[in-house]
């Protein structure tokens, strides 16, 4: 639809008024069906979506579908070239060949001319003259009975009678599914094959899948990238997508100015925003993945809410979807994020926004960690962190470079979640970097060493683990008793037991038990009892092992963190079985496995399966 204003066409005379695109059309059968249906039921239908998603091409196809329903034909008005709002009625008048009579407004002349006509008026590309287009539509719908309007716009017109259809990107390849060829892949290959040397094979398939994902399934971006295959080859094209704007420029002189490069396409939307909305948009670019409204406000200012609504409306932000944790999250397509990042740098706001993201990450990690200190808080906190994964890690990465004490707090807060999700190596690396940059006086320094000890012990790096636990014990031994000291002693005891230094292990565990009781530190007391039980069982003292484990079991575990509570609960069946008390122990083991799975504790699940494998295999076959 690249003709500024086109005459009314009648089906009898064919669809002369429609633009015939010179490239093939791919997919979209569902969207065409849906929009054609909406045109049947509503008088005003607006197809919305981000720049280059294919609204105009879709409208073209819809028009072909519905043309024979309109006795007086279709009239198409291309508004992209109309630079001023005041010129909108005139552009429509030209399209329907109405001449303004003296003393009559253009709108009245249009209304009079169109009355009793069964006509579909297509207003293509309305976003930059939105108010004028909306005003005209409202006037025509009010005064002309039979007219229907199909509009395309990055932002809806905002009229009460408007039915909106958000055009999604083209379908993308999905992992582990055997789909028919996704639309985005089909478009890329079709356009790349305009270059006769382009061939598709198993290697190129994988790269094309990644390319179209990174281009968000946006047809314009896909076409611009496909045109670069000849000059760059697929692997280099993929490599260079991080800095995509200088690359994705069209050589097609027939293309509309706003579609001649990917940057120009986004510029078009960005410049339609108010200054305050631009500021919010570019700050959202710091989010590497989905983000909540709270996160947006933390980074873009407490007053970001109204701007967010506008950004969703004008297709710069993907509308919120509910995550597994029950919270709604917005998303920026990768191209829009890259564009926003460039604007953020230009505005000199990059560091400030990154710091705000780091503060937000610390806030989320801290709240989740507090939730996880009791067992019942573990599942919601874990799901929350899963959903915030990309965001909190980005915040932590920035803090590690710029704000070590914040990074240490954040890493310690995330540690239980890393443990549950089996991400020990990543967790250790982050904790180690944070600990290396801070001194013992900072609050969570001991906790960081404790977690580093746990992660090292989990990977059987006993020497390393002993180093971390030993650091805590040596630093705190001469001071007044503390929970940190109890934890360090229990950790050290466990490594000593693992390496069969049972006497020393027992000494540490007894000291820890004694201190924990004096401090009324219940978690420490329970963990020390469990540790003593394991030491006894390693020393082949079955009765004593069961006795310690029973003592641990008798204490209420519900106010403890789940990962400790489960460890303690697993101790009793474990020592019973290795001590030969088989009755009932297997049921306890099966329950332990179920609990680990229910909590999503991959570490505990793996431990349970490992320790119990001979019995579980026998029990479940
Ligand atoms: N389904 C499709 N099959 C083939 N090509 C498509 C398809 N959808 C869009 N394109 C191509 O992608 C480019 C952008 O499409 P289009 O102009 O329709 O986007 P738009 O959403 O109207 O963009 P804007 O917001 O800038 O108006 C065009 O070159 C168009 O031909
Ligand atoms: Mg368009």
Image (cartoon, rainbow, N blue to C red):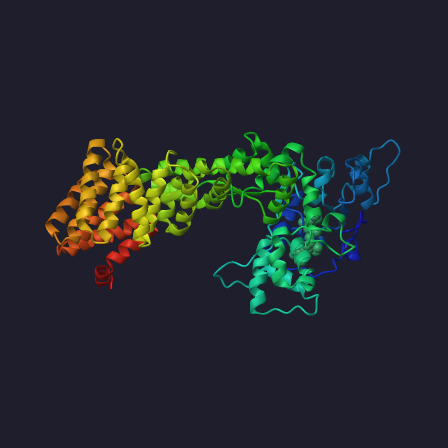
Does residue 297 sit above or below 289 in this rendering?
Answer: above
Picture quadrant of residue 499: bottom left
Is residue 29 at least partly visible in the picture?
A: no
User: Could you tell me which quadrant the C terminus lies in?
Assistant: bottom left
Give the camera-side residue of 180 and 145.
180
Taking the image as shown, residue 339 lies to the left or right of residue 122, namely left
Residue 124 point in image, percent of width and height: 72, 46
Taking the image as shown, residue 299 lies to the left or right of residue 535, namely right
Give the camera-side residue of 245 and 138.
245
Give the camera-side residue of 531 and 470.
470
Residue 225 point in image, percent of width and height: 66, 57
Furthest residue in direction right, as rendered: 102
Is residue 387 at least partly visible in the picture?
A: yes
Picture quadrant of residue 561: top left
Q: How many marks?
A: 0
Give the camera-side residue of 346 and 446.
446
Residue 127 point in image, percent of width and height: 70, 41
Residue at x 62%, y 63% (from the top left corner): 234
Picture quadrant of residue 375: top left
């Amino acid at each position: 639809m690249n003709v500024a204003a086109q005459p009314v066409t009648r089906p009898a005379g064919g669809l002369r008024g429609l633009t015939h695109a010179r490239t093939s059309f791919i997919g979209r059968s569902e969207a065409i069906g849906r929009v054609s249906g909406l045109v049947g039921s509503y008088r005003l239908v607006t197809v919305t979506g981000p720049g280059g998603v294919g609204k105009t091409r879709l409208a073209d196809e819809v028009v072909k579908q519905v043309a024979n329903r309109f006795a007086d034909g279709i009239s198409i008005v291309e508004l992209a070239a109309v630079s001023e709002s005041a010129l909108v009625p005139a552009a429509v008048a030209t399209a329907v060949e109405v001449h303004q009579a003296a003393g009559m407004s253009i709108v009245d002349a249009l209304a009079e001319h169109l009355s009793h006509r069964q006509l579909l008026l297509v207003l293509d590309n309305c976003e930059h003259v939105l108010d004028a287009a909306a005003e005209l539509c409202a006037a025509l719908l009010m005064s002309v009975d039979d007219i229907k309007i199909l509009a395309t716009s990055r932002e809806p017109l905002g009229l009460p009678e408007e039915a909106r259809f958000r055009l999604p990107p083209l379908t993308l390849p999905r992992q582990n599914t055997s789909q028919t060829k996704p639309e985005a892949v089909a478009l890329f290959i079709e356009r790349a094959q305009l270059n006769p040397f382009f061939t598709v094979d198993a290697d190129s398939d994988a790269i094309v899948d990644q390319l179209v994902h990174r281009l968000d399934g946006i047809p314009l971006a896909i076409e611009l990238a496909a045109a670069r295959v000849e000059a760059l080859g697929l692997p280099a094209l993929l490599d260079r997508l991080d800095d995509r704007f200088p690359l994705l420029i069209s050589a097609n002189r027939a293309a509309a100015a706003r579609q001649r490069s990917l940057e120009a396409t986004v510029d078009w939307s960005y410049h339609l925003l108010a200054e305050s909305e631009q500021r919010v948009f570019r700050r959202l670019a710091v989010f590497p993945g989905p983000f909540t409204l709270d996160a947006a406000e933390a980074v873009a200012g407490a007053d970001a809410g109204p701007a967010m609504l506008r950004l969703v409306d004008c297709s710069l932000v993907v509308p919120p979807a509910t995550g597994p944790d029950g919270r709604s999250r917005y998303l920026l397509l990768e191209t829009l994020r890259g564009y926003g990042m460039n604007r953020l740098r230009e505005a000199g706001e990059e560091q400030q926004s990154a710091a705000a993201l780091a503060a937000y990450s610390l806030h989320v990690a801290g709240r989740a960690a507090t939730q996880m200190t009791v067992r019942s808080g573990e599942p919601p906190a874990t799901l929350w962190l899963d959903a915030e994964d990309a965001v909190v890690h980005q915040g932590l990465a920035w803090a590690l470079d710029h704000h070590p004490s914040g990074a240490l707090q954040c890493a310690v807060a995330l540690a239980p979640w890393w443990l549950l999700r089996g991400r020990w190596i990543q967790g250790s690396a982050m904790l180690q970097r944070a600990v290396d940059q801070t001194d013992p006086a900072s609050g969570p320094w001991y906790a960081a060493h404790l977690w580093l000890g746990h992660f090292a012990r989990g990977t059987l790096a006993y020497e390393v683990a002993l180093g971390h636990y030993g650091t805590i014990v040596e630093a705190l031994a001469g001071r007044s008793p503390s929970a940190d000291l109890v934890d360090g002693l229990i950790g050290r005891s466990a490594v000593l037991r693992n390496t069969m230094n049972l006497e020393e292990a027992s000494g540490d565990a007894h000291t820890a038990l004694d201190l924990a009781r004096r401090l009324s530190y219940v978690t420490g007391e329970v963990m020390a009892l469990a540790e003593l039980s394991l030491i006894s069982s390693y020393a082949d003292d079955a009765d004593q092992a069961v006795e310690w484990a029973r003592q641990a079991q008798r204490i209420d575990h519900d106010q403890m963190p789940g990962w400790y509570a489960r460890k303690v609960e697993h101790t009793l069946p474990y020592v019973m079985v290795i001590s030969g008390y088989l009755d009932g122990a297997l049921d306890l083991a099966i329950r332990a496995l179920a609990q680990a799975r229910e909590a999503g504790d991959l570490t505990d699940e793996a431990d349970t399966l490992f320790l119990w494998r001979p019995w579980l295999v026998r029990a479940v076959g």
